[in-house]
């Protein structure tokens, strides 16, 4: 739904809800798509949300709405729903969506829902809950469409016609007698070969697959690189456990991009997580505290040179620009490196990447050293200060580019998400290094 | 291919290429996937790239490799390939991939390839080239699988069996007599209804579609929100022009996320664009120049207060921390806002978003004012400086949060990508505002 339409829908639904017009409200709701309704709910207050959700008459739609709700909204609407109602709505959801919803509910509610679920459905969900949520196992659906390799195309088409659970079949996966994944074929392929052809003769045996414990980012990379609509997930014996479908791949790519960007700015929440205003604000504390500690060290550093600064007060005016130039060139290097790691471009070209960034730092350092040093000389006529500024800008911008490239690469080597500490650490470290160079050079030249 | 495997493959292929071992080289290449080979090529020098590509014996694979090459690599390998060779390889590509390749080649080469293409194929590509590359029309494939609404399921299955062009059929789109898109159905649906059923009776009439001129970001949002494998593209009369498939949607989402992140760091290139080292470095200039100008203004501001700073030198030591705290809280607010705009969460909740960020700024401002002011008082015993620091931190962090939220929102209102200027403008503006408050309050208290 386009943005202006969404706003109109929110207004209409809110008005109907507030006035208690249940019949027209139910009508507007029935005409909406579940995804749109979930978006509308995101803009209502908790009591309005519950009132609107109570007027979703169709269980299939109600279930779809629940899976599309973000963060707090799910708890506002469904946090006090009876477990039996969940079990009824789960009938309309695939096992991976059930698992995803259960994972987002409080433990107590989750347990009482599980207790009320039927044997097989419950086993399936409990198995999925056993995988870490950011792995292939955690996002896969067990609903892969499987066929035995000794079937003919005719048998296979009959199997498709009987597979009521599989609303949309992406690929048909072919298994051998040991249940191992040995091939893949498309629905169309089954139709274009003579009915008596064996699957083993028409299937593609070059099947890409991932293991259940594979990180979801890696799964997304495989799907995106090879343009797959679904990635099969197998166990250590190559038995098919399920598939990760492309809609989940898209969610992973979007979430990881958002996470990277927020992490680089030192924001740890996704704004979708529950929590009040103060708790939200406190989530910003870590980076700001690093900034605080770095800033206090810098105040000590400046205080150590205060006699010199007092004697040559022009020095003070150029502290911010020296720090700013290198901070920014360092952030640019870090951002490009984090992106390069994410896209796989830096995989085998570490030396080339570091070289390119150091060149950038050195080249831009010389450009800006001339500009800032020249300005300092012309404006204040202080050759010593101008020289200190120039030396500090060149060495500072070069080392900032080096550090900005090496920090994310090192973090990755130690298994830490490169985006996590790139922003805060690089800027704080750069501030200290650059200022130390500036004041030391000045001390040398002025003494 | 996993990262370590890719490194091994690069080494093996490079070694064979350097030693001129053509036969084993061709063998390794034939065993690779096109996407992997393109990734390998990305790590070779231009002469190595040409040598390896010359040993891709299968035209279908060579064509697939070309479409997977990034930036410069395409020009190194194919920049001097004869137009006739392109025309031959194009036989193995869909029209949207042909168009994409042509759009990345120099104009002269593009024209001479087009001249050599056959009538119908050429018309198709020329029509696609007519759409802006970042719109639905620019990324769509004309290969939508179409059926007339008066057909039966039996006819439709026969059509599927004859549609040799459509390797993988996503959905079957149903058109009425006027060629308008009136419904959609799945291949499986055709198989599970009696053969004589009319498509009009089993199709879903609730078809989401976009217009050819729709921005590609909006297309991606539609596909992601409604979990579609393909989005139909229609003209103003609702006639089906083509489909945007989910693999292109994934590319859009990845590119836009990368673009946002790089733009926020003031980097305008994607590292995939052509250009030498100096040209790459110069792409970083714009933000750094804003930083330079802001820094020079700040040096003037400090110079205007130099008498006071000289008399109370402790003031100088707290300039960086005051600027750093607000700069970072401003970046956090801006990043969250840019993400909120991208995900659509802020659409109807502008006031709530601004309120939340101002609260963050004020709350965190008080926390850090106490910390930094307290430190200043205890460490240097200067009550006036401590009070100035505290006031500057509170007002600065609050206004930085406000500006950090309002700048991206305003940019969007004026149709500018919110990510473009968020980083540079916010930090530079914040630096100036915060420092002015700090020095003015100090001047007031110390006078």
Image: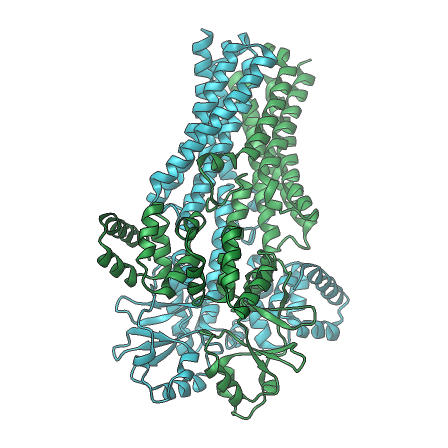
Chain colours: A cyan, B green
Of A98 and B190, the residue lying toward us: B190
The residue at 66%/15% (across/down) is: B446
Q: Up-down: is B363 above or below A259?
A: above
The residue at 75%/74% (across/down) is: A24
Q: Quadrant of the C terminus of chain A?
A: top left
Horizontal side of residue B291 vs B64, given as left or right: right
Q: Quadrant of the N terminus of chain A?
A: bottom right
Q: Position of residue B402 (x, y in %)?
A: 66, 39
The image quadrant that residue A36 belongs to is bottom right
Q: Position of residue B391 (x, y in %)?
A: 64, 27
Residue A86 in view = yes
Q: Residue furthest right?
A: A19
Q: Up-down: is B46 above or below B385?
A: below
The image quadrant that residue A56 belongs to is bottom right
Horizontal side of residue B370 vs A29, given as left or right: left
Horizontal side of residue B144 vs B439, given as left or right: left
Of B26 and B397, the residue lying toward us: B26
Q: Position of residue A197 (x, y in %)?
A: 33, 86
Q: Position of residue B309 (x, y in %)?
A: 60, 14
* Number of numbered discs on residues: 0
């Amino acid at each position: 739904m386009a943005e202006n339409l969404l706003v109109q829908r929110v207004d209409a639904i809110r008005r109907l809800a507030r006035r208690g017009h249940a019949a027209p409200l139910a009508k507007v709701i029935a005409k909406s798509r579940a995804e749109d309704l979930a978006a509308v709910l995101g803009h209502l207050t908790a009591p309005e949300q519950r009132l609107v959700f109570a007027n979703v008459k169709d269980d299939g739609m109600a279930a779809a709405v629940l899976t599309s709700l973000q963060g707090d909204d799910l708890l506002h609407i469904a946090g006090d729903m009876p477990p039996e109602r969940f079990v009824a709505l789960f009938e309309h959801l695939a096992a991976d969506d059930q698992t995803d919803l259960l994972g987002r509910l409080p433990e107590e509610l989750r347990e009482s829902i599980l207790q009320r679920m039927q044997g097989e459905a419950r086993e399936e969900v409990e198995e999925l809950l056993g995988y870490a949520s950011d792995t292939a196992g955690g996002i896969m659906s067990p609903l892969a469409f499987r066929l035995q390799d000794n079937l003919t195309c005719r048998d296979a088409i009959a199997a498709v016609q009987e597979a009521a659970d599989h609303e949309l079949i992406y690929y048909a996966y072919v298994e051998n007698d040991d249940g191992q994944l040995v091939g893949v074929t498309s629905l169309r392929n089954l139709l274009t070969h003579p009915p008596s052809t064996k699957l083993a003769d028409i299937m593609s045996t070059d099947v890409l697959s991932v293991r259940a414990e594979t990180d979801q980012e890696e799964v997304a990379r495989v799907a995106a690189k090879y343009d797959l609509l679904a990635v099969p997930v197998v166990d250590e014996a190559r038995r098919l456990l399920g598939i990760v479908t492309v809609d989940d791949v898209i969610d992973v790519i979007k979430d990881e991009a958002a996470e990277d960007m927020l992490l680089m700015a030192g924001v740890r929440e996704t704004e979708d997580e529950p929590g009040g205003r103060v708790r939200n604000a406190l989530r910003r504390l870590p980076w700001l505290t690093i900034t605080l500690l770095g800033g206090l060290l810098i105040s000590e550093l400046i205080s150590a040179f205060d006699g010199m600064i007092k004697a040559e007060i022009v020095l003070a005016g150029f502290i911010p620009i020296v720090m700013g130039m290198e901070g920014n060139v360092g952030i640019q290097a870090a951002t490009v490196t984090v992106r390069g790691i994410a896209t796989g471009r830096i995989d085998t070209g570490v030396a080339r990447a570091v070289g390119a960034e150091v060149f950038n730092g050195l080249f831009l350092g010389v450009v800006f050293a001339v500009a800032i040093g020249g300005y300092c000389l012309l404006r204040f006529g202080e050759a010593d200060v101008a020289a200190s500024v120039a030396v500090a800008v060149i060495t500072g911008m070069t080392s900032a580019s080096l550090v900005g490239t090496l920090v994310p690469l090192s973090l990755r080597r130690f298994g830490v998400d490169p985006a996590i500490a790139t922003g805060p650490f690089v800027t704080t470290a750069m501030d200290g290094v650059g200022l130390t160079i500036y004041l030391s050079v000045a001390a040398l030249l002025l003494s």
